Image (tube, rainbow, N blue to C red):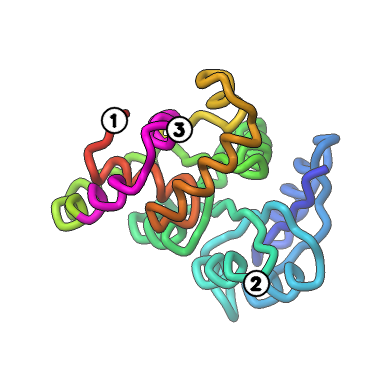
Amino acid sequence: MIRAMIVDDDALVRLGLADLLDGDEAIETVAQASDGLRAVELATAHRIDVALVDVRMPRMDGIAATARLRALPHPPRVITLTTFDLDEYVYDSLTAGADGFLLKDTAPSEILRAVHLVASGSAMLHPAAARRLIDRYHQAGHSRAAAARKKLENLTPREREVLALLSRGETNAEIAGHLGMRESTVKAHVSRILTALEADNRVQAALRARDAGFTG
């Protein structure tokens, strides 16, 4: 069972998301918060697997809340779910540690898929957000390319194979199938890759690989 938390200052949005999530037999909404500060309090008191977090909220916004949530001893995965796909929102939320970025007009089935993917250790970005993020990284990419290539030098050939598939958005199970290894072994490789690339999550690891011009 995936334990979810909804963080949004709009009560109707919280109600709608709770109905959606609770309609999936593998997801349970265990907490709701109307601002980022309350979200951190609830995540400290309860085990949360995935938090759906709005950006614009009183007391503590979603970006700051994401950073605080990811810094907890048992951090939940975070999906930013907002009305706005502004460049700074996409970049700042992922930099803060979010594993996903979706717009509120995303189809309900895709929101549910995102919760499952993020809970399993994968990532999911709204296509428009992904394009904006790639464009921003291309514009400022030259200054990071050398540093990213240096980090990739620390990876073994096997870890490079895992990174190539991870960068294409494949799940741990899919990577295991492609490379003929156990899923637990893939998880160990992914953990090592994140450490070597100084990345907080799979999205950041994929961006490091893109910075370095790595294609596998």
Could you tell me residue 49's position as x and y percent?
A: 72, 53
Q: Which residue is mark 1?
A: 215
Work out whether residue 61 can be spotted: yes
Residue farthest left in this picture: 142
Precedes in sequence: disc 3 or disc 1: 3
Q: Crowding near pointer 1: few (<14 within 10 Å), some, many (20+)?
A: few
**Amino acid marked by disc 3:** Val
Work out whether residue 133 can be spotted: no
Tell me what residue is drawn at x 24 percent, y 52 percent.
150
Q: Which residue is mark 2?
A: 35
Q: Secondary structure at mark 2?
A: loop
Relative horizontal placement of residue 41, taking residue 154 as reference (left or right):
right
- Locate the C terminus and report the quarter of the image it occupies: top left
**Amino acid marked by disc 2:** Asp
Total labels: the figure holds 3
Q: Which residue is mark 3?
A: 162
Tell me what residue is drawn at x 62 percent, y 72 percent.
36
Q: Secondary structure at mark 1?
A: loop
Q: Crowding near pointer 3: few (<14 within 10 Å), some, many (20+)?
A: many
The span from disc 1 to disc 2 (Cα, nearest Å) is 40 Å
Tell me what residue is drawn at x 40 percent, y 47 percent.
205
What secondary structure do most residues of the magenta stretch adopt?
helix
The span from disc 2 to disc 3 (Cα, nearest Å) is 37 Å
Precedes in sequence: disc 1 or disc 2: 2
Tell me what residue is drawn at x 65 percent, y 77 percent.
37
The relative height of residue 154 versus residue 89 in the rendered view (above or below) is: above
Q: Nearer the viewer, residue 83 or 143?
A: 143
Relative horizontal placement of residue 54, taking residue 86 as reference (left or right):
right
The span from disc 3 to disc 1 (Cα, nearest Å) is 11 Å
Magenta segment: 147-166
**Amino acid marked by disc 1:** Thr
